[in-house]
């Protein structure tokens, strides 16, 4: 076995877990889950059947990754953050055929206790602050806070805030890495 599973964890037969991954205390991974290499699933994490988790993701304690959620490479899910998969759930009405897809792209940070409402796409290297509620798509590199989440700035791939306006033209450099970012309209891209 090229990955680590704590004795208290339950990994259903058929689940795919990549090399070097770690499954900690009281985790439940369902049979259809696809988990990449070098992933860390913290205590009390649940991973549904129709879930894809990319390489090097870190899922902190008490996170449930429900069906129809895809996490690309290097996503950080803070403690007790929440994914949903039904837009208008009712206990007495079956709506499993109404699950909405949620896509979290490469390098995203989802802060502790934030909520990601199903059906959204969160762009590369976006940063969602603790406690925020994301109910619409998020642009790459956007810094999002609040309920509902709103953009208040930009973040570098390194995770440092970049001093640029929310819209317009401009360039800025990440103080930690020296990488340059270019803002055109409301789209930020990395130049170097």
Image: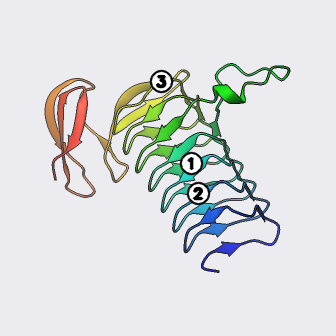
User: Could you say whether the residue bearing mark 3 is in a helix, strand or loop?
Assistant: loop
Q: Residue at x 67, y 59 (%)?
A: 42
Residue drawn where x is 20% and y is 53% of the image: 179
Front residue of this view, candidates 58 and 159: 58
Residue lying at 56% horizontally and 22% vertically, measured from the top left: 147
**Secondary structure category for the residue under label 1:** strand
User: With respect to residue 89, does 192 lie above or below?
Assistant: below
- The residue under label 3 is 136
Task: Give the number of the mark in front: 2 or 3.
Answer: 2
Task: Place residue 85 in its image quadrant.
Answer: top right
Do labels 1 and 3 touch, CB within 8 Å?
Answer: no
Q: Which residue is mark 1?
A: 77
Toward the viewer: 60 or 145?
A: 60
The answer to the question of whether label 2 and label 3 lie on touching residues, with beta carbons closer than 8 A, is: no
- In the picture of the structure, the residue carrying the numbered disc 2 is 34
Determine the CA span between mark 1 and mark 3. 18 Å
């Amino acid at each position: 076995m090229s990955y680590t599973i704590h004795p208290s964890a339950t990994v259903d037969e058929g689940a795919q877990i990549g090399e070097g991954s770690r499954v900690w205390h009281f985790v439940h991974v369902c049979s259809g889950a696809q988990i990449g290499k070098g992933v860390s699933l913290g205590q009390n994490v649940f991973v549904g059947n129709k879930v894809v988790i990319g390489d090097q993701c870190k899922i902190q304690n008490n996170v449930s990754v429900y069906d129809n959620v895809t996490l690309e490479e290097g996503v950080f899910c803070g403690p007790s953050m929440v994914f949903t998969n039904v837009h208008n759930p009712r206990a007495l009405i079956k709506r499993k055929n109404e699950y909405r897809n949620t896509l979290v792209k490469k390098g995203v940070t989802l802060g502790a206790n934030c909520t990601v409402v199903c059906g959204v796409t969160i762009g590369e290297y976006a940063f969602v602050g603790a406690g925020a509620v994301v109910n619409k798509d998020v642009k790459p590199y956007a810094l999002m806070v609040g309920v509902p989440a709103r953009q208040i700035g930009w973040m570098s791939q390194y995770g440092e805030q970049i001093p640029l306006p929310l819209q317009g033209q401009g360039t800025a450099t990440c103080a930690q890495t020296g990488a340059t970012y270019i803002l055109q309209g409301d789209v930020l891209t990395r130049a170097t």
